[in-house]
Image (cartoon, helix red, strand yellow):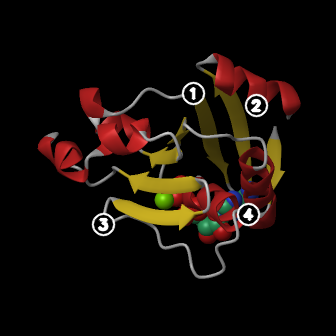
Amino acid sequence: MKLVGESATQALGVKIANLCAPPLVIHLIGDLGSGKTTFARGFIQSFGHTGIVKSPTFSLLETYNFVGVNLYHYDLYRMKDPHELEYLGIRDLSAEVDAISLIEWPQRGGEGVPHADLVIGLEYQGDYREVGCHAKSMQGQAIIDQL
Ligand code: ADP
Ligand code: MG
């Protein structure tokens, strides 16, 4: 699917967020500048967050707490040591009944990264982005079926 303009990437984030029930893990795959954080921005704001959505580039994790949903937004691009994941507590956090985890650069996290229910692949195409959604669990498939 073709996403033309930043607002289209955000809108997909909103749309998918509206279909998500915790616990859920989403992997966001794509090069730098492909729109992963833009997607996360729409996703997070759709829960009612009105402040800025900071890229977790340096912090690795930004947390947003809502009634019934704890949203964990990771960017593992700068991760150097697998122990950093343990320190973040990514396994325990993603296992919470209220958890929805959005993980940018999951491939940098290695073995310790929780398995995805849904994988969103974004590809840079100059002035637009190409997106593909892939289910990795029944929960993920249920979301794709409703898209
Ligand atoms: P990433 O987190 O993958 O590195 P970002 O979400 O920070 O990427 O996006 C990088 C740039 O791409 C931003 O300037 C954003 O506005 C732009 N962008 C996002 N989606 C689209 C789109 N569908 N079409 C054009 N530009 C987009
Ligand atoms: Mg990003």
Q: Is residue 56 above or below residue 118?
A: below
The residue that mark 3 highlights is 59
State if disc 2 and disc 4 touch (CB < 8 Å): no
Compare marks 3 and 1 and give the one earlier in the sequence: 3
Compare marks 3 and 4 and give the one earlier in the sequence: 4
Q: Nearer the viewer, mark 3 or mark 4?
A: 4
What amino acid is at disc 2?
A: Ile
* Left or right, residue 2 beside residue 22: right
State if disc 1 and disc 3 touch (CB < 8 Å): no
Q: x and y percent of residue 37 in the render?
A: 55, 60
What whole-number distance in Å separates the C-alpha atoms at marks 4 and 2?
16 Å
What whole-number distance in Å separates the C-alpha atoms at marks 3 and 1?
24 Å
Q: x and y percent of residue 24 in the render?
A: 56, 36
Q: Is residue 122 above or below residue 52?
A: above
Compare marks 1 and 2 and give the one earlier in the sequence: 1
- Residue 117 is labelled as 1
Looking at this view, is 110 or 121 the one in front? 110
Looking at this view, is 87 or 67 the one in front? 67
The N terminus, quarter of image: top right
Secondary structure under tag 1 reads loop
What amino acid is at disc 4?
A: Ser
Residue 127 appearing in the image:
no
State if disc 2 and disc 1 touch (CB < 8 Å): yes
Secondary structure under tag 3 reads loop
- Residue 46 is labelled as 4
Q: Nearer the viewer, mark 2 or mark 3?
A: 2
Q: x and y percent of residue 79 in the render?
A: 23, 50
Residue 19 appearing in the image:
yes
Mark 3 packing: few (<14 Cα in 10 Å), some, or many (20+)? few
What whole-number distance in Å separates the C-alpha atoms at marks 4 and 1?
20 Å
The C terminus, quarter of image: top right
What whole-number distance in Å separates the C-alpha atoms at marks 3 and 4?
22 Å
